């Protein structure tokens, strides 16, 4: 999305890497995932604001990007020193306005930092890939949607494998982090059922009770298997004009 708006984006996979990048180069903006591994987005922002940290610009605008949408989340983000808040799945128009609001006319550079079990109620198959929702959030840009969906399809098998390994090891923290990433990625591409199932696994990891996780994981894997076909058909239809 950022590239489509005309910005250049650098990606940091965790909070410490982001701080290192901000200490070495000047950026116009940080898009901060609140659920970063190692050093979360809240603490990373507090360190950015600290005059004792090595970052070059302690006043750099920081926009929170989080899959949470609960009352009080915005206040928590602002209390940590962030300037603004965008919830996932990301709406491209809202993102563009937020970036423009905090960077002014500058489009030279944009620093980006990479966010009790219940048996799921069956949902309509349309929720496995909500093409209309995806295109609406991308202002009807089918080419951009195709790129995003293609990257999702390429990366999701590895993410699911890593999540399965965490569940098999009974590693609650790794399971929570992996499920959180899948939840946001699936929501961003219109994979609503996958996102809902990943949210259940994230909660199990947060609660430290992975005993029901294997069953939910199987449902998540099955949802992805069903999601692939319509997503692949969508990508082919866009590429074929």
Image (cartoon, grey):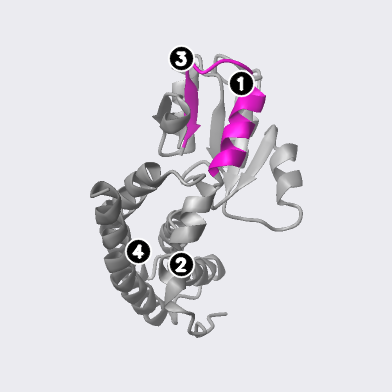
> Marks 1 and 2, how far apart in space?
34 Å
Query: Of 131 and 127, which appears nearest the observer?
Result: 131
Give the residue at x 43% y 68%.
Answer: 194
- The mark closer to the camera, 1 or 2, is 1
The disc, 1 or 4, on the residue closer to the chain's N-terminal end is 1
Q: Earlier in the sequence, mark 3 or mark 4?
A: 3
98 displayed left or right of 127: right
Q: Can residue 61 be seen at all in this image of the molecule?
A: no
Viewer can see residue 91 = yes
**Tag 4 residue:** 163
Q: Which residue is depicted at the point 27% across and 67% down?
A: 229
Picture coordinates of residue 10, whole percent (x, y): 41, 27
Q: Nearer the viewer, mark 3 or mark 1?
A: 1
Give the tally of numbered discs. 4
Reading the image, the residue beneath label 1 is 103
Which residue is disc 3 drawn over? 25
The image position of residue 157, as x and y in percent, is 26, 60
Mark 1: secondary structure: helix
Say which label, 4 or 2, has the lower sequence index: 4
Q: Nearer the viewer, mark 1 or mark 4?
A: 1
Image position, residue 223 (x, y; %): 36, 73
Find residue 121 and name its label. Answer: none
Secondary structure at numbered mark 2: helix
**From which residue to which does the magenta span run?**
92-113
Image quadrant holding the N terminus, namely top left
In this view, 219 is above or below 134: below
Rendered view: 28 above or below 124: above
In the drawing, does residue 87 fall left or right of residue 178?
right
| Mark 3 burial class by Cα count in 10 Å: few <14, some 14-19, many 20+ | few
Q: Which residue is mark 2?
A: 198
Q: Residue furthest front?
A: 241
């Amino acid at each position: 999305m950022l590239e489509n708006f005309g910005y250049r984006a650098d990606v940091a996979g965790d909070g410490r890497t982001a701080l290192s990048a901000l200490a070495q180069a000047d950026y116009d903006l940080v898009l901060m995932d609140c659920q970063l591994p190692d050093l979360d987005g809240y603490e990373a922002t507090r360190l950015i604001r600290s005059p004792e940290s090595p970052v070059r610009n302690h006043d750099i605008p920081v926009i929170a990007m989080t899959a949470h949408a609960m009352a009080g989340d915005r206040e928590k983000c602002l209390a940590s020193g962030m300037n603004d808040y965008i919830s996932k799945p990301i709406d491209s128009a809202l993102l563009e306005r937020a970036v423009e609001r905090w960077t002014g006319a500058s489009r030279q550079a944009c620093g980006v930092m990479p966010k009790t079990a219940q048996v799921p109620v069956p949902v309509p198959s349309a929720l496995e890939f909500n093409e209309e929702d995806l295109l609406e959030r991308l202002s009807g840009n089918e080419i951009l949607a195709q790129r995003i969906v293609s990257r999702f399809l390429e990366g999701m098998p590895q993410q699911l494998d890593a999540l399965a390994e965490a569940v098999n090891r009974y590693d609650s923290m790794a399971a929570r982090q992996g499920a959180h990433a899948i939840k946001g990625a699936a929501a961003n591409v219109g994979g609503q059922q996958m996102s809902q199932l990943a949210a259940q696994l994230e909660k199990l990891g947060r609660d430290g009770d992975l005993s029901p996780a294997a069953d939910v994981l199987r449902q998540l894997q099955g949802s992805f298997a069903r999601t692939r076909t319509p997503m692949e058909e969508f990508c082919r239809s866009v590429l074929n004009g």
